Amino acid sequence: MAFSVRSNSFKDGDYLPKPHILSEDFGFGCAGGNQSPHLAWSGAPEGTKSFAVTCYDPDAPTGSGFWHWLVVNIPANVTELELDAGNPRAPKLPAGALQTRTDFGVPGYGGPCPPPGDHPHRYFFTVFAVGAETLPVAADTSAAVVGFNLHFNTLAKAAIVGLFKRD
C-alpha cells in the first residue's frame, strides 16, 4: 500500500472552505475561521518512528514561498489530526507532537490569505513518515531548519493540495 493522505475537510485540488482561511485577527484582510483541516494518512513505510505535517504555499509573493503550519514528532501510532488540531489556544495535537514557528512568526496553524486579485494559490498539506522519533527542533525553530531535518529523516511523504484565491 502506498503512503497517502486524505482529508474530510476538502478534496485534493479543491478550493479550501472558509473555516480554513486566515482569520481577521491576523490583520491580513481575510475573515475565515483559521481552523486547520482534518488530515488522515495510511500506508506508512516500515521503520516509521514518527510523522510530521506541513502546510506550504509555493505561490506566495515572497521569493521563498510561505510556511503556514509545521508539526513534528507526531507519534508513529497516530494516523490523523482532527479538525482545528493546529489551534495553539486549544491544542488537540497528540501527546509529544510539537508545532514550530511558521512564517507568521509563531507556532500554530495560519490559514491562507493571498494578496487580493492574485492567481489561485496552492496550499500543500504534506505528511512525512519520519525515521526518527523526534527531530532536534524547538517551538521557535524556523521552517527552513525543520525542513533541513525532515530532508535527512524522511522515509516517505504524501501531499494533498487545497486552493484559495481572494477577489
Image (tube, rainbow, N blue to C red):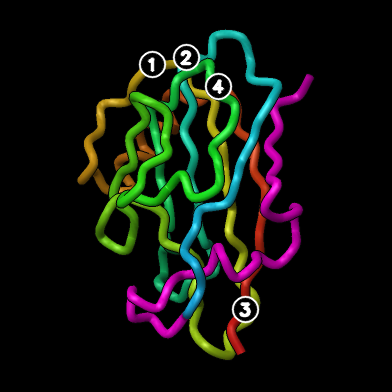
Q: Give the residue displayed 42% in from the left and 39% down from the top.
A: 92
Crowd band around label 3 with a 10 angstrom C-alpha radius: few (<14), some (14–19), many (20+):
some
Does residue 81 belong to the magenta stretch?
no
- Specify start and end residues of the magenta stretch as a single range: 1-30
Rendering coords of residue 54 (x, y %): 48, 45
Q: Give the residue displayed 62% in from the left and 72% down from the top.
A: 164
The quadrant of the image that shows the N terminus is top right
Q: Is residue 112 left or right of residue 70?
A: right
- Find numbered disc 1 in the image and state the secondary structure of the residue it sits on: loop
Q: Main secondary structure of the magenta part?
A: loop
Q: Are marks 1 and 2 in contact (CB under 8 Å)?
A: yes
Does residue 24 belong to the magenta stretch?
yes
Rendering coords of residue 161 (x, y %): 66, 54
- Find numbered disc 4 in the image and state the secondary structure of the residue it sits on: strand
Amino acid type, callout 2: Lys
Q: Are marks 3 and 4 in contact (CB under 8 Å)?
A: no
Amino acid type, callout 1: Glu
Q: How much space separates mark 3 and mark 4, taking CA atoms?
A: 33 Å
Amino acid type, callout 4: Leu
| First along the sequence among labels 1 and 2 | 2
Pointer 1 residue: 133
Which picture quadrant has residue 162? bottom right
Q: Give the residue displayed 53% in from the left and 16% down from the top.
A: 77
Q: How much space separates mark 3 and mark 2, taking CA atoms?
A: 37 Å
Residue 165 circle label = 3
Rendering coords of residue 148 (x, y %): 36, 37
| First along the sequence among labels 4 and 1 | 1
Closer mark to the observer between disc 4 and disc 2: 2
Image: 28 above or below 7: below
